Image (spheres, rainbow, N blue to C red):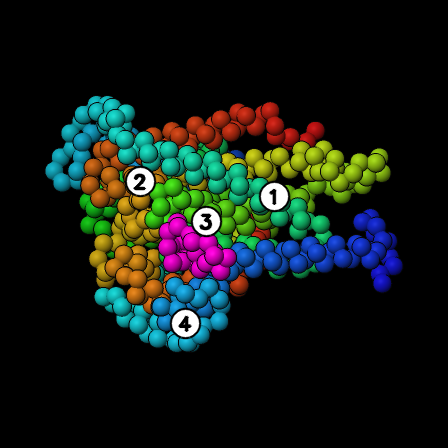
Amino acid sequence: MATETTFRGPRTRSERSRRLLIHLGLIAFGLVMLYPLLWMLSSSFKPTAEIFREPGLVPQNFTPGNYTEGWTALQHPFHHYLLNSAVVVAGSIIGNLVGCSMAAYAFARLEFRGKRLFFAVMLATIMLPIHVVIVPQYILFAELGWINTFYPLIVPKLLATDGFFIFLMVQFIRGLPKDLDEAARIDGCGHVRIFCRIILPLSMPALATTAIFTFIWTWNDFFSQLIFLTSPDMYTVPVALRTFVDSSSQTSWGPLFAMSVVALGPVFGFFLAGQRYLVKGIATTGIK
Amino acid sequence: MALLQRRPRTDPAPSPAPPAGRAGTGGRGRVRRENLAAYGFLAPWFVGLVFITAGPLLASLYFSFTDYSLIGDHEVVGLANYERMLTDTRLHSALKVTFVYVFVSVPLQLALALALALVLDRGVRGLALYRSVYYLPSLLGGSVAVAILWRQVFGAEGLINQVLGFFGIQGEGWVSHPDYALGTLIVLNVWTFGAPMVIFLAGLRQIPAMYHEAAAVDGAGPVRRFWHITVPMLTPIIFFNLVLQIINAFQTFTQAFIVSGGTGGPSDSTLFYTLYLYQRGFGAFDMGYASAMAWLLLMIIGGFTAVNFLASKFWVFYGD
């Protein structure tokens, strides 16, 4: 029996059973929420006929066959698409880290003509829906001969067009003590060295948040990959899954589920590894 | 200029311009140098602004007054695209579907997010675990894989109907029924309540405990404390979530595309605005019309955001 008295009052028997009820409610709700995901995982090991019969989580006839079948069901083996996605994601992460941190340094630490205006413009671009700019972008990239390459997906990141991350880093850099830059400047450091040797190393949490969110968003992104990648050679995982679901009949749901699980795996992995940054990132900037 | 100064690292080596000389150039030299450095750091962003964001934004306004199929030249047609919108019944159903989706799913999603944040904020042990579990769908909800899952779960022989079958209920094929297909996507959006919930939790932490203590001493019960302390103090966060989720919801594409196989069916019941825009622009290569649609979307989102901000004066409480 806990005897200490907190603001919430002494922990009586009824108080404890109330807490237990809350926990039971939260656990039950969590299970209902996660059930479809868990069921998809378990169903990926069921023969397809069983998927449409068995709402339970335990496969009656456990089979890894869906994975081998799904892996080779499309024009290319599935690792081809995984690799393509990995290239796009890696390029996007590098692009966002470089482009956005440079812009953020200027906004957070330097004084220059037009700063307030440009900062306002940058904030406004955060709200700009991609659908509004996609047509001219497509025309531009078509002129450059970039359709069906990864450039339209990666180059914009390098050009710091994800204003969210600039904003995130500006907020972070503003919180760093200015004495360090001043000291470095007195010692004769230029802005490039202050940026590379002082600001960037201290901004690791913000950079990590940027990298994790870029990973998840790019990995899940469907709209722009659907538009810019036109041949199966260049397909990323989401676009490949889409052709899979369009071509599949009732009989291939098992392999389809298996490849969907493969597609969700990396996001789940990053979620587990980067939770701390994710929660902090959402809480401070409200990004999804 | 500053960018050119990058040299291999030569740690404490003196820089070519000694600090004394730099100080001697006075304020104006320093201001100029800082200007140049800033524009150097912003150079990629400027290029992106011209070619990727603001430039294309203006270009699409121009294209909205043209007839352009990507092949051959475009032809300026004045307001023809906008006039066409008035009689385009598919556009009207796309608008209706999108509005229903936004104004049903966002309030439900935020209410659920707030309710759970309130429960979790009461010092529940294992908060971090619950928070993670509830947040997970927000990360996965926009993916093609989850949309595929949804298509099965709400299909004629899907998980939902298997469960209903236990109770002897014969369910519909939810995703293939024009009356219910949109509902399944609303459920999907409500399912991703975790992100706003995390923001609510952070906001609840900001409310000083002493307000609650003082009110409790004065005899206010939990219900009154909720309405007179928690809600007013939380209004900025509610407002923030509302603006953000409305903007997000207007742009929903992937789920509708996958669940309907790209058609927006059955009978246009999941023809989201962005999906119709995609069909016009990248199915029919009707780029002029797609651009006009893009600008209408911008106007709608901008309009709702502006109304939100204006209305916020009457219900959002910013302290003092």
* Residue name at image x 64 percent, y 43 percent: B203
Q: Element at badge 2?
A: loop
Q: Is residue B151 magenta?
A: yes
Report if the CB atoms under discs 3 and 4 are less than 8 Å apart: no
- Residue B137: percent from the left, percent from the top? 50, 54
Residue highlighted by disc 2: B268
Q: Amino acid at mark 1?
A: Leu
Q: Quadrant of residue B158?
A: bottom left
Dot 3 and dot 1 within a common chain: yes
* Residue name at image x 23 percent, y 62 percent: A233
Q: Can I make out residue B84 in this image?
A: yes
Gap in angstroms between the C-alphas marked 3 and 1: 18 Å
- Magenta residues? B150-174
Report if the CB atoms under discs 2 and 3 are less than 8 Å apart: no
The chain that hosts pointer 3 is B
Tag 1 or tag 2, which sits nearer the N-term? Answer: 1
Report if the CB atoms under discs 3 and 1 are less than 8 Å apart: no
Q: Element at badge 3?
A: helix
Judged from this view, the residue extending furthest toward the left is B72
Does residue A85 appear to the left or right of A166 in the view shown? left
Residue highlighted by disc 4: A45
Gap in angstroms between the C-alphas marked 3 and 4: 24 Å
Mark in the foreground, 2 or 3: 2
Mark in the foreground, 3 or 1: 3
Residue highlighted by disc 1: B114
Mark in the foreground, 2 or 1: 2
Q: Quadrant of residue A46?
A: bottom left
